[in-house]
Image: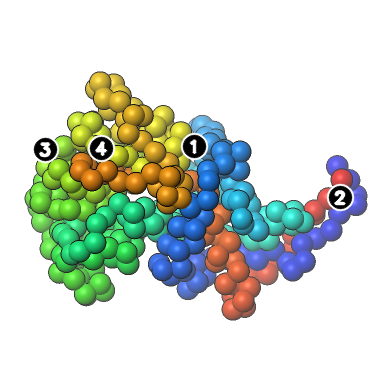
Amino acid sequence: MSDDGFLAEPPTLFLTDADVAELADWDSAIAALSAAYSRPEDPQRTPERVVATTDAGWQRHMPSAPAGGRLGGSKTIAASIRNGVVSYLITLFDQNDSRLAALVDGNRITGIRTAATAAAALTRLVPSGPLTAAVVGSGFEARAQLRAASRVVDIREARVSSPTAANRERFATELSEELGIPVTAVASSEEAVGGASLVLCAARSRDETPTVLADWVDDDATIVSVGSTTPSQKELDPALIGRAGLIVADALAEVLHDSGDMIAAREAGYDPDRVTVSLHDLLGGVTGRPERGIAIYKSTGSGFQDIVLGELLYDRAVERGLGTPLPVGILTIRK
């Protein structure tokens, strides 16, 4: 502790969920994350997440100080599973002078960065030419996945499935109009996935049984899986993991050891470690997709993504005069 300290100058900026919506766009987010992941991975700059259990749920802390970036920080997720609510907060610190540059509502960023990172992976996983996409799920994450994928993949048509008919019909109507491609609502995930070259998975079942089975998937399909981020969550059939010729992980250690899909596949006798590589290696040109076989992009999410996108949005906010400068702040202490 010291009395020799100073307040941030310029003042700490608060970005609301509405600010994030105004500042973000898909092309810039995809480009920023593609550039960041093309650099070599440095686990010391993005250590594994820390989860603290609470009486009502959990708190997750995801720190990162990306190489080549000016800002570092973390995203904290506070979840009350008992009450079905969650809050996301991103802190951004200047890596040079340690001032608290910004506090950002992390709700919308979470969906944007997840989908934008997947789209960055698709630039190296999906061959050129028009294709049919399947979307499993019709919520915020599913919508974001199709929006982002459509920026980098030539999607000729899409099919969407989810348990509630009204939700999947609304998804199909709204995304057809927004993206200018035919999106059809179908009654089952099997109907959506069969014959699709690109499968976007963004929904888990209520009982944590897989929502996509191996027998439904074509031999050379590309799959994006973002719905299983903890050991207890399931999205992909273990046999589908077993069929993969390549699995790309946004956070290698966490995908392999903290995703319920990978844990279940290992328990079923498959060896996902053998075919799993980091997204850094894929976008950095160290490895590529094999000529044949299923490719899976598997995401558990990473503070790396939050900070890369947070810095992009912070710089835009300063440039455009958006956000709310805080009238108070924390001291940066001279040591």
The reply to whether discs 3 and 2 touch (Cβ–Cβ < 8 Å) is no
Quadrant position of the N terminus in the picture = top right
Q: Amino acid at mark 3?
A: Asp
The crowding category of the residue bearing disc 2, from other C-alpha atoms within 10 Å (few below 14, some 14 to 19, many at least 20), is few
Q: Nearer the viewer, residue 123 or 173?
A: 123
**Residue bearing mark 2:** 334
Which tag is nearer the camera, tag 3 or tag 2? 3
**Residue 263 appears left or right of 213:** right
Which tag is nearer the camera, tag 4 or tag 1? 4
The crowding category of the residue bearing disc 1, from other C-alpha atoms within 10 Å (few below 14, some 14 to 19, many at least 20), is some
Which residue is situated farthest in the bottom direction here?
A: 320
Q: Helix, strand, or loop for circle 3?
A: helix
Q: Helix, strand, or loop for circle 1?
A: strand
**Residue 217 appears left or right of 21:** left
The residues bearing labels 1 and 3 have C-alpha atoms spaced at a distance of 36 Å
Of the numbered discs 1 and 3, the one sitting upstream in the chain is 1
The residues bearing labels 2 and 1 have C-alpha atoms spaced at a distance of 34 Å
Which tag is nearer the camera, tag 4 or tag 2? 4
Residue 331, by quadrant, is: bottom right
Of the numbered discs 2 and 1, the one sitting upstream in the chain is 1
